[in-house]
DNA sequence: CATATCGCATACACTAATGTCTGATTTAGC
DNA sequence: GCTAAATCAGACATTAGTGTATGCGATATG
């Protein structure tokens, strides 16, 4: 820890957050967004960005960490112990957007951060989804004629599709709140029964 | 047409095809693959590539055109007039991989080719999917409580997820042939009924 | 209100990818 | 087998993104 004569200035903190925020948005819609674009989106100069993050990697790592923290916080509040359909709905509604963004980010930082950080950011939230899917499967509530791996993959695919549609303006927030849980349920309903 | 003293050499034709092929593969797995990587994947020198395509844009355009042609050819043979479930299965089985690749390509060439070419490559195959989805919906066979736009989006999302899983080695060809049609059906089955 | 801190603009070096030019070498067509 | 056509390797110019250095101006903090 460095001893400071004065506290960190408030505008500096605001700008730092604004940068991470802008980076998350820019990179989600264009994985090869430049630092100049991100700085512009954050409403600051390009050089100022380097005052907060000394390299592209440092920035993407910060974005990944924030994203991971947001997901942990968000998912942590969801009760996954009751009825699996209810739990699934709650999980999807609370985190579909975050999970989608995170998945895109993982592609962006693939060769820029350590393999451990990647695994962490990928496996941690995946773990919860996986556990819930397994529980529903063992209870006979979810379909069992497909591998869990594929079910997780299609789960994420649907979240990602919804996020992309919303970003493109072809789907409203309200519609997404309806169709995303609907579609996820449809994928997991046992063939030949109702959901 | 230029009058040629000799026919185009066979190795030149082979190399040109190899380049387009390699480009399709490379760009599908890494949208920002360099021309050097593509040339290497095609087994030729980087400069030779420029002998066939004078710019990156010219190459990506060629890839897009070939992909569009492949899709037209492949989808053209599928009979979409009978039972909608049968037609859906046939459509998915014949073209899920091509449609996925094409969707990735569209992202790659987004700012590199004309908007018309983009629309063409996007709307043409989409039209068939759309038409089939509409027919199934009007017949009451597919679910009607979601917009067709969203159904098309989730349709593509599932194909893309499968292609990515196969590419990553987490899903075999045989498994994909099973789960992709299964999952697409699940998304379109009316809520509360069987598929 | 004083000043350390932060923002910002210009300028510059470095790197990687793109695209061009050349001349030597191989290969397919006739 | 002769020749045109194609491949190839190396060098080079250009461009775009990245990262650094500097000096001035703005501002939040104490």
Image: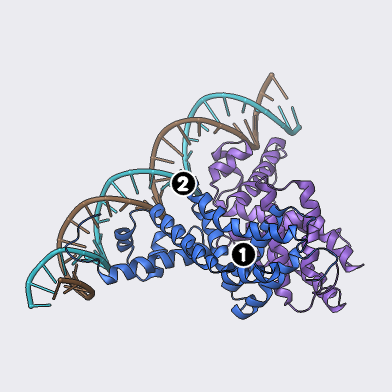
Chain colours: A blue, B purple, C cyan, D brown
Residue A114 is marked as: 2
For the point 67% across and 41% down, which residue is it?
B18
Residue that sits furthest to the right in the current view: B82
**Vertical placement of residue C27 versus D26, above or below:** above
State left or right for residue B100 relative to residue C23.
Answer: right
**Label 1 packing within 10 angstroms: few (<14), some (14-19), many (20+):** many
Q: Which label was assigned to residue A160?
A: 1
* Closer to us: B114 or A133: A133
Q: Quadrant of residue A6?
A: bottom left
Q: Tell me if residue B5 can be seen.
A: no
Residue B38 sits in quarter: top right
- Do discs 2 and 1 belong to a common subunit? yes
Question: Seen in the image, is B166 located left or right of residue A193?
Answer: left
Q: Give the x, y percent position of residue A39.
A: 37, 65
Whether residue A178 is situated above or below residue B84 in the rendered picture: below
N-terminal of the two: label 2 or label 1? 2
Spot occupied by residue A85 in the image (x, y as percentages of width and height): 70, 69
Q: Mark 1 falls within which chain?
A: A
For image coordinates 65% across by 47% down, the residue present is B168
Helix, strand, or loop for circle 1? Answer: helix
> Is the C-beta separation of discs 2 and 1 under 8 Å?
no
* Total marks placed: 2
Judge by depth and name the residue closer to the eye, D4 or A64.
A64
Report in which chain the residue with disc 2 lies: A
Residue B4 quadrant = top right
Disc ID at residue A195: none
Residue B160 x, y percent position in the rendering: 68, 58
The location of residue B69, given as percent across then percent down, is: 75, 56
Camera-near label (2 vs 1) is 2
């Amino acid at each position: 820890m460095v001893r400071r004569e004065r506290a960190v200035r408030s505008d500096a903190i605001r700008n730092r957050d604004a940068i991470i925020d802008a980076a998350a948005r820019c990179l989600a819609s264009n994985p090869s967004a430049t630092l100049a674009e991100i700085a512009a989106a954050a409403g600051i100069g390009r050089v100022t960005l380097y005052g907060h993050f000394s390299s592209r990697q440092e920035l993407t790592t910060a974005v990944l960490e924030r994203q991971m923290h947001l997901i942990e916080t968000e998912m942590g509040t969801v009760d996954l112990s009751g009825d699996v359909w209810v739990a699934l709905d709650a999980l999807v509604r609370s985190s579909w957007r975050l999970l989608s963004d995170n998945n895109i980010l993982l592609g962006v930082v693939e060769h820029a951060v350590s393999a451990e950080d990647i695994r962490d950011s990928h496996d941690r939230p995946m773990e919860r989804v996986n556990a819930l899917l397994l529980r529903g499967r063992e209870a006979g509530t979810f379909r069992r004629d497909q591998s869990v791996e594929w079910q997780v993959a299609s789960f994420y695919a649907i979240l990602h599709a919804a996020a992309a549609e919303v970003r493109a303006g072809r789907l409203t927030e309200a519609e997404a709140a309806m169709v995303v849980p609907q579609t996820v349920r449809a994928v997991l309903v046992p063939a030949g029964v109702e959901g």
